[in-house]
Amino acid sequence: MIKDNHGTGHIIQSLIVNLLIVFAKGFAAFMTNSGAMLAETIHSFADCANQALLLLGVKQAKRPADDSHQFGYGMSAYFWSFMVAMLLFSVGGMFSIYEGWHKLHHPEPMRQIWWGVGVLVFSLILEGYATISNIKSINQKRKKSFMNYITTTKDSDLIVVFGENSAAVLGLFFALMAMLASYFTGNPSYDAIGSIIIGVILICVAIFLAKEVHSLLIGESADEEVIAIIQSVVSTHPSIENIINIRTIQQGPGNVLACIKIKVKSGISAVEISKSINDMEAELRRQKPEVRYIYIEPDLQEWSVNS
């Protein structure tokens, strides 16, 4: 298993697997004349392009802040993850449905089916391995139920790879069943239906991924765990009477902006308030390094709760 190098190991692993699979599927599609196999070939080719885009997003997200992007480039990871979802929808899903629809209306006999069966079983083994490795990576990070993590995590690239791998395993299974059904019944329509099912699976996964990444792209708040730690650190400081409000935004994987308005106790000097704020910022960064940008505003009143 490839070690996770700065968060890209799971992407590189899936890219290598899909490069092997795309050539095998393409050869099998040519040998068998299977529409489902051709759909799977296009699917794997799209996955290779998707993983290249994810690597680009991760690389861009690590660029340091500059004058034009003063909070860094972390949102780049979300943009490219969203583009992956769109490609999965269009290139993968829509093409598979088109190919299946075409084969239904212009059926062609399949040939040398065992080439296709062998490649599909080989691909299932590789994709299954990649999916299991991806799940292990998720399990190492999550502190909640699996499905809860999938729908709330800010690590968009990890979820996109999981979605692609899961769709690949399901697609390969249906392609195999469709091919075998066409062979044993002599009816090529089953192969065409398999292609359509693969397309529907890809579109459903793409819609799910687009929905999740879209929420991050337009500015989602930080994890509840991060907000809870901010509340704990700030509210327990001796100079703080209470927290007026906390506003957070996820600026990319591992990059949180936090704006906090506090009500300070009366009789505290400006120097003491400044020192208290510095102490709170240092403690927040110690407990949660992903809170990289912190703005704490002191106040004596609570009229500005919604400001």
Image (cartoon, helix red, strand yellow):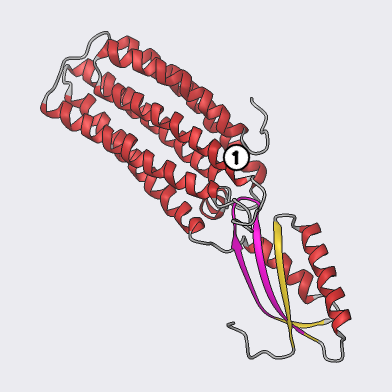
Where 201 falls versus 193 (above or below)? below
Residue 108 appears left or right of 258? left
Q: Secondary structure at mark 1?
A: helix
| Residue 197 rendering spot, x and y as whole percentages | 28, 35
For label 1, the crowd category at 10 Å Cα-Cα, with few meaning under 14, some 14 to 19 and many 20 or more, is some
For the residue marked with disc 1, what is the amino acid? Lys
Seen in the image, is 204 located left or right of residue 300?
A: left
Instruction: Please tell me which residue lies in front, 307 or 161.
Output: 307
Q: Is residue 167 left or right of residue 247?
A: left
Residue plotted at (28% across, 25% down) = 36
Could you say where residue 88 lies in the image, as x and y percent from the top left? 38, 39
Q: Is residue 149 magenta?
A: no
Tell me: residue 112, above or below residue 64: above
Q: Position of residue 243 (x, y in %)?
A: 71, 80
Quarter where residue 167 is shown: top left
Identified at 77% across, 76% down, the residue is: 235
Location of the N terminus by quadrant is top right
The region drawn magenta spans 244-263
Name the residue tied to disc 1.
59
Q: Main secondary structure of the magenta part?
A: strand
| The C terminus, quarter of image | bottom right
Q: Position of residue 142 (x, y in %)?
A: 63, 48
